[in-house]
Structures are given as structure tokens and as C-alpha cells.
Image: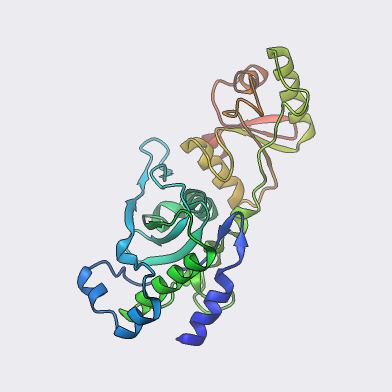
Amino acid sequence: RRPVLAAAAAAAVALSGGAFVGHGVGRPASAPSRARGLSVAMRAEFGDIRPMIDASVYVTDLDPITAEVDISMIPEEMGVYAVYNDKDALQYIGLSRAISKSVANHVIAFGPAEAGRMVSKVKILEMAGESKETLKATWERWIKEHMEVGGEIPAGNLPENADGAENRWRNKGAAAVKAPLSLAGVRGIETMAEALEAVATAVKKHPVLLFMKGSPAMPQCGFSAKTVGILKELGANFESVNIMDPVANPGVRDAVKEYSKWPTIPQLFIGGGLIGGGDILA
């Protein structure tokens, strides 16, 4: 197991989209008796490095309207986290500068068809202010704890070309999502006329443009998350506008509705024409 773990660790500590990524199938070691049963060697090796049993547990939910994964309860702090599927099987152990962003990226990477099943529960140990070395040591302890009680290296933590590896946990697709546009630019937007002009210019300039609530990395409503998930599944190269950002896009929320004569957000434009929102895109 040790050579495989070493290979997994080497693959896991690369920076990706602001997150240190560690990658994670088996059953969770949740009972205190299991933690007490860890070997003396394990406890000696890691000393004060905190075990998985110290983590808080967050159960994700499905939005009753959109059936999208609700991860609004996930904290934004730096730390180590473990993700379980709907069968309570460990899928991934990761470390991140911003856990909520990393979990959102996982949801996007799996898309609306699979995210609810794959991201069902998250164990989180918040570690604000800790060093990268401490984060990595905690991640390694969690992996070894899981293996010591009979689990295997989680599929997302396996080297990329290993049998059984699930590379979507590595967040490569999610990390490649572009930052939202700023329609205000350096000139700013002060009137509705200027906001309408900015919307019209952006729609004509960008072949695929999504007006949404939040960003592709962190959608702020289920319909926006659903639309981003579909675009990601299709491999679409698209730009986005966060209509909730009052600095980058003041007045754009009302302006895009006036421009398109469509009352709801998100709105997807392709080739200058309105396609619609997540329901129509689906």
C-alpha cells in the first residue's frame, strides 16, 4: 500500500484553482472505538495531527424546486475535508484554502446528473491559519486512518492512470472555469441606458454568454448551478456575468431582462440570441 499511497500523495498536493488538492472508496471510520483502535505506530507517527473523528459533519441537501445540490452550509474556511456518496462510501479526501469553493467545484465537475449522489456528506476540519505542511500531514493521516481500518485508497486519491481512479475529483475541469466578466469596466455604469448598452455589447462580443446569479465556481441559485453544470457537461467554452455583483455589473440584473424581454435569471445567449434558462437548456 505504501508505494501507492506515496504516488497518490504526490499527485494530491498540486495547487488547483486556489485549493491544495488531495484525492479520495470504502466505509467511513466514524465510531470512536475505531479511532481508539488505531495502531500505536499511527499515533506515534502523527502526534498532535488531528484525526478524522475531530471533523464536523455536513449533510448536503437537494433543492426542492431544482433538485440541485445545496451546499450553502459548507464553511468557507481553510482545512481538510472528506466527501461521501449517498451510500456513505468515502469518495475523496482533500485539502483546500476555501472548502466551500472546492466542494462547489466538485458539484460542477460531476454535473447535475451525478452531483447529488456523489456529494452527499462532507466531513470538515477547519484549520484557519495552519501551515501547508500541517494541512498535508492531516490529509495524509486521514488517508492512512481509512486504510488502517480496512478501507482502500479512495478512487479520487489514486494516481491519474491507476485502475479505478476517478479523475473528476481532481477538479481540473472546475478549475478551468473563467472568472465572470465585469461589464462596468473602467468607465463604470451609472444609468439604465449605459447598462443596456453594456449588455448589448457583451452579447454581441461573446459567442456563448451566461447571465447568472453568482459565478460558475460558486453559483448563488439552483437554476444558475444547473445551467453551469449542463454547459460543463457539454464542454462549452463560455463567458459569464454575475448579475449579483453591484460593483462589476451595476444595473445589469434589470438591464438584461429589459434587453431580452425575458423575466428570469439565468439567461444564456448563443451567437447573440437568447436561448433561455436552465429548464430550456436541459
Q: Against 41, is 204 above or below?
A: above
- In this orientation, does residue 105 appear? yes
Name the residue at 39% across, 56% down. 117
Residue 24 located left or right of residue 266:
left
Residue 23 located left or right of residue 246:
left
Name the residue at 51% across, 75% down. 158
Name the residue at 45% across, 68% down. 139
The quarter in which the C terminus is drawn is top right
Q: Against 95, is 207 above or below?
A: above
Residue 40 located left or right of residue 278:
left
The quarter in which the N terminus is drawn is bottom left
- In this orientation, does residue 282 appear? no
How many marks the image carries: the answer is 0
Give residue 200's position: percent from left, percent from top: 75, 23
| Front residue of 100 and 63 | 100
Give residue 190's position: percent from left, percent from top: 70, 15
Which picture quadrant has residue 142? bottom left
Give residue 39's position: percent from left, percent from top: 29, 83
| Front residue of 279 and 183 | 183
- The extreme left residue here reads 33
Give residue 214's position: percent from left, percent from top: 55, 36
Name the residue at 43% across, 43% down. 68
* Color style of the picture: rainbow
Which picture quadrant has residue 121? bottom left
| Front residue of 83 and 141 | 141
